[in-house]
Image: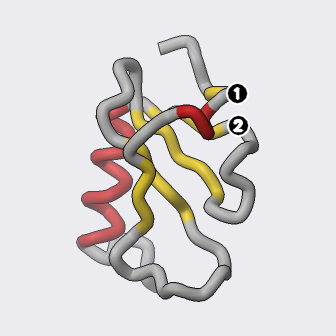
Amino acid sequence: MTEQFIPGAAALNGWRKSSYSGNESGSCVEVADNHPTGIPIRDSKTPHAPALLFPRAGWSSFITAVKSEAFLT
């Protein structure tokens, strides 16, 4: 995967927030599913800005680590 960001990410369908996000307008990361080359990630406060694009395997490993609380000290 050579592409690392998606300039027109606002045009993608299927953006979703974490179930841990509140309804306030605070900081939140959104993820889009079904992109052909990776997992797009964007800041919900700036939905028209470019989105970062992560490899599927890397994103999956990150989510597994978060769920296992690997980052807690």
Q: Which corner quadrant of the image does residue 33 belong to? A: top left
Check the image and report above or below for 56 versus 59.
above
Is there a contact, CB below 8 Å, between mark 1 and mark 2?
yes
Q: Which mark is residue 46?
A: none
Q: Which corner quadrant of the image does residue 63 belong to? A: bottom left
Residue 33 left/right relative to 5: left
Residue 61 left/right relative to 48: left
Residue 5 visible in the snapshot:
no
Residue 59 visible in the snapshot:
yes
Q: Earlier in the sequence, mark 1 or mark 2?
A: 1
Q: Residue at x 54, y 62 (%)?
A: 29
- Give 18 or 4, whichever is nearer the viewer: 18
Check the image and report above or below for 23 versus 35.
below
Residue 27 appears at what percent x and percent y? Answer: 65, 75
Check the image and report above or below for 21 versus 31.
below
Q: What is the secondary structure assignment of the residue under circle 2?
A: loop
Q: What is the secondary structure assignment of the residue under circle 1?
A: loop
Residue 35 appears at what percent x and percent y? Answer: 38, 28
Disc 1 to disc 2, how far (Cα)?
A: 4 Å
- Give 37 or 45, whichever is nearer the viewer: 45
Q: Residue at x 41, y 44 (%)?
A: 32
Q: Which corner quadrant of the image does residue 70 belong to? A: bottom left
User: How many numbered marks does the figure carry?
Assistant: 2
Residue 36 appears at what percent x and percent y? Answer: 35, 20
Residue 10 left/right relative to 38: right
Hey, what amino acid is under mark 1?
Answer: Pro
Task: Kindly identify which residue carries mark 2.
Answer: 50
For mark 1, does the 10 Å Cα neighbourhood hold few (<14), some (14 to 19), or many (20 or more) residues? Answer: few
Q: Which mark is residue 7?
A: 1
